[in-house]
Image (spheres, rainbow, N blue to C red):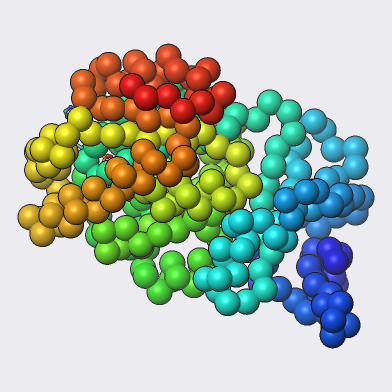
Amino acid sequence: MIGGNHERNNFSIGVQIHDKNSNNWFSPIVLGTGPKPSQGYSAFVLEQGRILVIKKGSPRNESIWFLEVDSPYVREQKKLLRKEVVAWSKGVRGNAEKPIVISGPSGVGKGTLISMLMKEFPSMFGFSVSHTTRSPRSMERDGVHYHFADKKVMEKEIKDGKFLEFASVHGNLYGTSIESVEAVTDSGKRCILDIDVQGARSVRASSLDAIFIFVCPPSMKELEDRLRARGTETEEQIQKRLRNAEAEIKEGISSGIFGLILYNDNLEECYKKLKVNRLLLIAQNVVMF
Ligand SMILES: Nc1ncnc2c1ncn2[C@@H]1O[C@H](COP(=O)(O)OP(=O)(O)OP(=O)(O)O)[C@@H](O)[C@H]1O
Ligand SMILES: Nc1nc2c(ncn2[C@@H]2O[C@H](COP(=O)(O)O)[C@@H](O)[C@H]2O)c(=O)[nH]1
């Protein structure tokens, strides 16, 4: 049941589950941010374990919401949290631009390609600033490159449902907050997410309709050279990232998560392919370059 609650003079939208066997009602963990309390919502049960919530008479570009009850994302969260879980996700009617998820092993050039795209099309693309528990590099600024977070605080925020996805990557916690994605989409730009393969898998299982791109290095030797030349990691961290890279590349190429696989050999060539294949990306065909 989705309904209005009066709690300490605050009107809020609550969710309760009815267990037919015991005839009991209980409150699940509610992940994500639901619609703002107001009157005039309608709910429609959709296939794939989702309920569409829409406000009557809202303008075409106003947000609509999905309450995920039994989607792959919710099933995954139930397993992780060992509790009953439902999740709100935001949808947009009209010509909303799909977010772009870019993954690939550390050092392959994702950040470089994203910077080029944002520099050339500043009003078209916006970067989703992730949270991480790793320490900032000398050139990195809090709130610009990452939200540098305390592990306990971030874990609590994950439990509170503030993250679209999160993963332990190379020994640190990384995650995309719902707020970070909304900040970009609310500004009318297409959101770009630079996240690892585990994160991409979680986004794929969520109801965020995105385009998924995997960036591959021309060889492991070249990847190693790029990581070393960047000079941001210790030898131990480079070795860890290279070990993880092998599994990430295997999964990136074979998992079917990614609609486009780009080889970043020559940077300019790779960037051109990223730009000219926008139509192919949108069609979500698997293309190898
Ligand atoms: N095609 C290329 N040829 C040579 N060097 C490149 C190429 N693409 C990127 N680089 C260089 O490789 C290094 C790693 O690139 P970048 O930091 O963009 O990788 P990344 O995939 O974002 O890594 P991480 O996942 O660790 O953030 C940088 O020094 C960058 O200048
Ligand atoms: N699952 C997520 N992965 C993320 C996120 N933000 C970044 N990343 C990935 O982490 C590695 C390492 O990044 P680095 O900045 O320490 O070099 C890289 O592959 C990123 O794609 C996130 O929010 N979620």
Above or below, 280 relative to 215? above
Q: What residue is at 28 percent from the left and 50 percent from the top?
A: 247
User: Is residue 165 shown to the viewer in this render?
Assistant: yes
* Residue 272, percent from left and from top: 34, 15
Quarter of the rendering occupied by the C terminus: top left
Above or below, 283 relative to 179? above
Q: With 130 as the anchor, is 39 left or right in this view? A: right
Q: With 242 as the anchor, is 180 left or right in this view? A: right
Residue 188: image quadrant is top right
Q: What residue is at 30 percent from the left and 21 percent from the top?
A: 270
- Classify the position of ligand 1 by quadrant: top left, top right, bottom left or bottom right: top left
Q: With 220 as the anchor, is 170 left or right in this view? A: right
* Residue 287, percent from left and from top: 42, 24
User: Is residue 160 shown to the viewer in this render?
Assistant: no
* Residue 18, percent from left and from top: 84, 75
Q: What residue is at 32 percent from the left and 58 percent from the top?
A: 169
